[in-house]
Image (cartoon, rainbow, N blue to C red):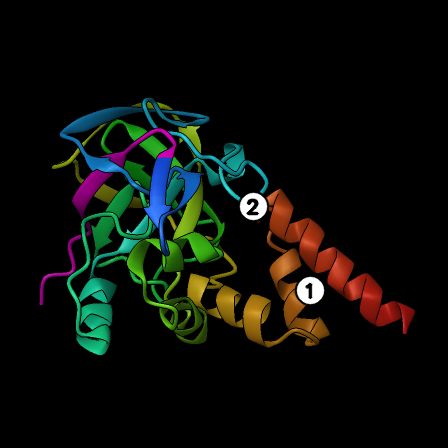
């Protein structure tokens, strides 16, 4: 079996107007276009952008990745065909499932070097784009959310660039387990602390988990 990590699709795009549900409009960066190459900076790909800075973007969330293998699952489950970069990801990848990628892992992608910082938190924009109200729930249930990365070294990324694991984080806590802790084990102090012990964890997740612990301790 071929386990070579590779890019299936490279996508970027600035926020634009999207029409959904009976002519409603919203400004969103989820609708990206496939490109042959793009330069990756500490703030993300040049030519890429997000609309809601509270939940997207920033140095800890500069790159959004989603496994291509899940497309077949969702298309089969919901009897539909999904467009490229359905979830607004920059990199649709193969052989990089959430169960095999860990918080803090470092990868070389083309000329750039990136580090996984957190799972991607699915938002209602996915529902608005796909018109599949149950998809969001299923993404959280399965933990098939994709994940976000910071950029350690800037550089050019091409759609045929190789992806190489440079360093697996010593804690070995997968994105799938992190999802289980964040979304399902809401009151599991020991597991939450294990996630917090990973120094490379995104600041937004760290702050959210600390608040969760403080609320539990206050009771």
Q: Which residues are magenta?
A: 1-16
Left-right relation of 204 to 180: right
Graded by Cα atoms within 10 Å as few (under 14), some (14 to 19) or many (20 or more), the crowding at tag 1 reads some
Q: Is residue 90 left or right of residue 213?
A: left
Question: Which label is found at residue 200?
Answer: 2
Q: Name the residue that disc number 1 marks.
A: 193
Give coordinates of residue 217: x percent, y percent. 87, 69
Q: Is 185 inside the magenta-drawn segment?
A: no
Measuring from the top left, give residue 195's x and y in whole percent. 61, 61
Q: Is residue 14 magenta?
A: yes
**Quarter of the figure with residue 112:** top left
Residue that appears at 63% across and 46% down = 204
- Locate the N terminus by quadrant: bottom left
In this view of the protein, which residue sits in the foreground, 159 or 126?
A: 126
Q: Is residue 123 visible?
A: no
Is residue 137 placed above or below 48 in the rendered structure?
Answer: below
Label 2 crowd (10 A; few <14 / some 14-19 / many >=20): some
- Residue 76: horizontal and vertical position, in percent? 17, 75
| Residue 174 higher or lower than 141, as above or below | above
What percent of the width, then of the height, locates residue 181?
57, 70
């Amino acid at each position: 079996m071929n386990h070579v990590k590779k890019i299936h699709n490279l996508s970027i795009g600035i926020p634009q107007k999207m029409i959904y549900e009976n002519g409603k409009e919203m400004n969103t960066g989820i609708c990206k276009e496939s490109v042959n190459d793009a330069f990756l900076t500490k703030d993300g790909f040049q030519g890429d952008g997000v609309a809601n800075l509270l939940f997207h973007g920033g140095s800890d969330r500069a790159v959004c990745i989603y496994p291509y293998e899940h497309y077949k699952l969702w298309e089969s489950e919901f009897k539909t065909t999904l467009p490229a970069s359905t979830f607004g990801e920059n990199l649709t990848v193969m052989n990089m499932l959430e169960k095999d990628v860990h918080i803090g892992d470092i990868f070389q992608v083309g000329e750039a070097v990136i580090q996984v910082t957190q799972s991607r938190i699915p938002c209602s924009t996915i529902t608005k784009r796909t018109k599949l109200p149950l998809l969001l729930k299923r993404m959280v249930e399965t933990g098939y959310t994709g994940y976000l990365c910071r950029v350690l070294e800037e550089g050019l990324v091409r759609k045929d660039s190789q992806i190489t694991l440079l360093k697996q984080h010593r804690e070995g806590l997968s994105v799938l387990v992190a999802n289980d802790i964040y979304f399902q084990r809401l009151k599991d102090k020991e597991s939450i602390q294990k996630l917090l012990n990973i120094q490379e964890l995104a600041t937004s997740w760290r702050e959210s988990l600390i608040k969760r612990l403080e609320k539990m301790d206050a009771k």
